[in-house]
Amino acid sequence: KHPPALFLLAKTNCLHLEQLCYSLFGKSPIKGSKLDINIDLTGSGNNLYAIVNSLDGQILIKAGPGDFLNSNDGLTNVFTSILNGVISFDKKTSSTSFTCAVINLNVINGIAKATNGIGIEAASVNVLGSGTLDLRNGRINFSINPQNILSGKIDLSSFSMAQLMKITGTITNPKISLDPTSLLSAGESIATELATKLPGMGLPTGLTSIIT
């Protein structure tokens, strides 16, 4: 006799990220932006623990285009803190545009893994991230690597510069740490990585690379 099986297929199209943030936080660090979520998971087992341990599939989240609001007074949630850390922005301007953002997690045996599967393509920075989400216990371990693409001279007194970031802990209690020495200069490594993988998912050229 085969154990019970779970087939989870969920798909949303064109949710409004700004409105969702308002619903969750009372204020949004994002202006505009669509949000698409696709979840395709299968598992089997005689109890919930066994099912979660056997989960395989994919979790894919796409957002954009939109604007990151450079001033986020009163917002102290983890989502805003992450964006503040990995996006470079001019404090004298109201917002920084982004073309697309992607989280692509491949799930095997209950562990969701992103290998350069997290990306943001913004006016000031390209971002790639990797790591794991253990669906069995909620533990997370992600490294986020931004690369500033600002041209010309930069007045550091008026800019908030992107920094290397580690996100650890659990989903319900995440810990964020920044590397204050990593005021990254313009370069080609992340831009090249963003531009050279799989095309054809209806995304801007850069972030088609991480939908594999």
Image (tube, rainbow, N blue to C red):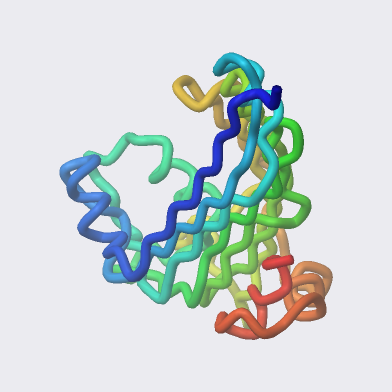
Query: In the shown orientation, is residue 167 left or right of residue 198?
Result: left
Which is nearer the eye, 61 or 95? 61
Query: In the shown orientation, is residue 206 left or right of residue 33?
Result: right
Which is nearer the eye, 28 or 157? 28
Classify residue 172 by image quadrant.
top left
Query: In the shown orientation, is residue 83 left or right of residue 59?
Result: left
Q: Residue at x 62, y 16 (%)?
A: 46
Spot occupied by residue 120 in the image (x, y as percentages of width and height): 57, 65
Q: Quadrant of the C terminus?
A: bottom right
Q: Residue at x 77, y 68 (%)?
A: 190
Classify residue 65 by image quadrant.
bottom left
Spot occupied by residue 104 in the image (x, y as percentages of width and height): 63, 56
Q: Residue at x 45, y 49 (%)?
A: 84
Q: Residue furthest front?
A: 1
Spot occupied by residue 206 in the image (x, y as percentages of width and height): 66, 78
In the depicted structure, whether residue 157 falls above or below residue 142: below
Spot occupied by residue 81 in the image (x, y as percentages of width and height): 43, 41
Q: Quadrant of the N terminus?
A: top right
Q: Residue at x 71, y 29 (%)?
A: 54
In the depicted structure, whether residue 126 falls above or below residue 123: above
Which is nearer the eye, 97 or 207? 207
